[in-house]
Image (cartoon, helix red, strand yellow):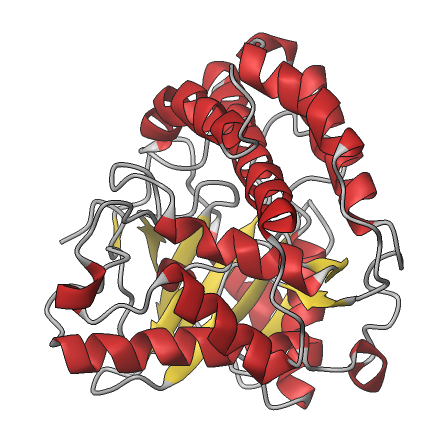
Amino acid sequence: MSVFEGAGDVRPGYELPVEVLASWLEDNAQGFKGPIKLSQFKGGQSNPTYRMDTPSGAYVLRRKPSGAILKGAHAVEREFRVISGLAKAGFPVARAVALCEHEAVIGSVFYVMELVEGRIFWNPTLPDLTPEQRAAHFDALNATIAKLHSIDPDTIGLGDYGRPGNFFARQIERWSKQYLADELAGRDPNMDRLIEWLPANMPADDGASSIIHGDYRADNLIFAADGPTVRAVLDWELSTLGHPMGDFTYHMMMYRLPPHMIGGFAGADLEALGIPTEVDYLKAYCDRTGRAVPTEEELRFYFAFNMFRFAAIFHGIKGRLLRGSAASEHAQTMADNFPDLAALAWAQTGVAA
């Protein structure tokens, strides 16, 4: 069992006023009926996430963390908006129930969605499956992100969900600023080098834009308990309009991240496991979306960019940990992994350190 799996007692400092919350939901969420039995999910590194069992059903609540937060971070309002829109396109997401933008209710902005039952694979090699079953689940992972990137944002009211064009330039600027602004978490020489290398090595902007998830991994999906059907994609905090290949190669980092980092299985015996090779997995996505397979030079940039971005997220977790506002009891592990991830990001460039 993963240390991130399941829900347990609410951790000290994360308590909620359940009677006030129940009253607000009864007034603002159709069909909701209290009282609430509250527990807290062990996962969720950014926004504290809770399970609510009630007479009207089981729900999930995600809230902004307490304390000082960086501008633009923890935008649970955007999560609520994107899952509401994607549901219109038949994309697998949890049903959005209610959004509260009044901090007075529980002390921060929050939203509630339905609890989707099913299976979450916290280990990216999907243990306990046969090679044939594992291959089918990986194909479903691939098909689901391809479906996401094929949805026209305008048709579901998300045409203004992000700014068009210059996706990589804007993302590099955003994560560089967040990294540099968090002085408490410190500096890293590989991150500093990447801040210079990435803008100088961006592929030409081909104008591609789609709804992107921003953190698409197996552990952010709920599969059916008995097969490879994806029942819901979770954790939309980093979603926006952006370059689909940037989003897909973030997902493909699983092939290059070591097993001790979230979502990685570098070095695994893929053939024995029934996991497609990196080349075959990339080709399957390109076949589904009609995109050209990236060149080796483009792939170097995509992987360096995504690992830089991932490292910046770990850096932010380190800063929140030092400030006492980290949402997960396992934040220390990610903070400790930050320098190794930054070094791995630089290694993707092919330039000697």
Say how many tags the image has: 0
Q: Residue at x 41, y 82 (%)?
A: 231
Image height of 283 relative to 303, above or below: below
Front position in the image: 42 or 258 = 258
Image height of 228 relative to 240, above or below: below
Picture quarter containing residue 230? bottom left
Where is residue 221 shown, x and y percent of the image? 40, 68
Image height of 130 relative to 197, above or below: below
Q: Residue at x 83, y 58 (%)?
A: 162
Q: Residue at x 53, y 30 (%)?
A: 350
Where is residue 57 shown, x and y percent of the image? 38, 80
Left or right side of 9 for 139: right
Picture quarter containing residue 155? bottom right
Q: Is residue 36 visible?
A: no
Q: Is residue 205 visible?
A: yes
Which residue appears farthest toward the front when viewing the image? Answer: 296
Picture quarter containing residue 55? bottom left
Q: Residue at x 60, y 55 (%)?
A: 214
Left or right side of 84 for 135: left
Where is residue 284 shown, x and y percent of the image? 48, 77
Where is residue 121 shown, x and y percent of the image? 26, 63
Q: Quadrant of the N terminus?
A: bottom left
Left or right side of 46 for 101: right
Front position in the image: 75 or 311 = 311
